[in-house]
Image (cartoon, rainbow, N blue to C red):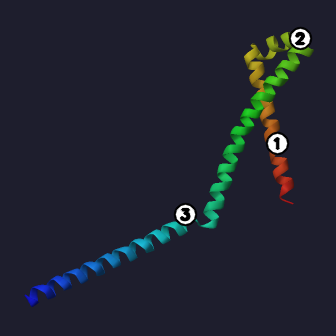
């Protein structure tokens, strides 16, 4: 009996040692993984990319809204100029709206780049 109890105790002790080692190895692996994720350079790079993507889509939305606003202003204030201009260059009203939206998008992005450049100083 004493030999059986010794083997059971030894078996429990080795299981506990294995569990401790496994926990220690897991903790070290997770620590390394989280260090890589929370590395300040990669985190900053991800934030910059996310901010630029958000700004791009915001600029597209603002560009379309401003393009539509300019389209309405142009058709209200200059109806006699709008029709020949559209027929000669852009063929349809939708193309004229897209053209104004593209110009507005470029303008918004230039303003955003200018503000960013000024904030660097």
Q: CA distance from mark 1 to mark 3?
A: 33 Å
Rendered view: 40 above or below 110: below
* Sequence order check, earlier mark of 3 and 2: 3
* Residue in the picture at 44% in, 74% down: 28
**10 on left or right of 73:** left
* Residue in the picture at 79% in, 36% down: 106
Rendered view: 58 above or below 70: below
**108 on left or right of 19:** right
Residue 97: which numbered mark, if any?
none
Check the image and name the residue furthest to the front.
Answer: 1
Q: CA distance from mark 1 to mark 2?
A: 29 Å
Whether residues under marks 1 and 3 lie with C-beta atoms below 8 angstroms apart, the answer is no
- Residue 23 position in % (x across, y down): 37, 74
Q: Secondary structure at mark 2?
A: helix
Residue 79: which numbered mark, if any?
2
* Residue in the picture at 84% in, 24% down: 70
Whether residues under marks 3 and 2 lie with C-beta atoms below 8 angstroms apart, the answer is no
Evaluate whether residue 100 shows in this view.
no
Q: Nearer the viewer, residue 75 or 85?
A: 75
Q: Secondary structure at mark 1?
A: helix
Q: Nearer the viewer, residue 4 or 44?
A: 4
Residue 110: which numbered mark, if any?
1
- Residue 35 position in % (x across, y down): 54, 69
Q: Secondary structure at mark 3?
A: helix
Q: Residues within 10 Å of mark 1 (few under 14, many from 20)?
A: few
- Residue 72 position in % (x across, y down): 84, 18
Tag in front: 3 or 2: 3
Question: What residue would you read off at disc 3?
Answer: 37
Evaluate whether residue 27 shows in this view.
yes
């Amino acid at each position: 009996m004493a030999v059986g109890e010794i083997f059971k105790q030894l078996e429990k002790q080795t299981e506990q040692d294995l569990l401790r080692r496994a926990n220690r190895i897991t903790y070290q692996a997770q620590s390394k993984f989280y260090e890589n994720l929370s590395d300040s350079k990669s985190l900053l790079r991800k934030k910059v990319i996310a901010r630029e993507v958000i700004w791009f889509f915001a600029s597209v939305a603002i560009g379309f809204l401003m393009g539509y606003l300019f389209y309405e202003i142009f058709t209200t204030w200059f109806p006699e100029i709008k029709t020949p201009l559209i027929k000669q260059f852009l063929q349809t009203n939708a193309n004229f709206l897209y053209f104004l939206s593209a110009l507005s998008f470029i303008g918004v992005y230039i303003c955003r780049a200018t503000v960013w450049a000024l904030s660097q100083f």
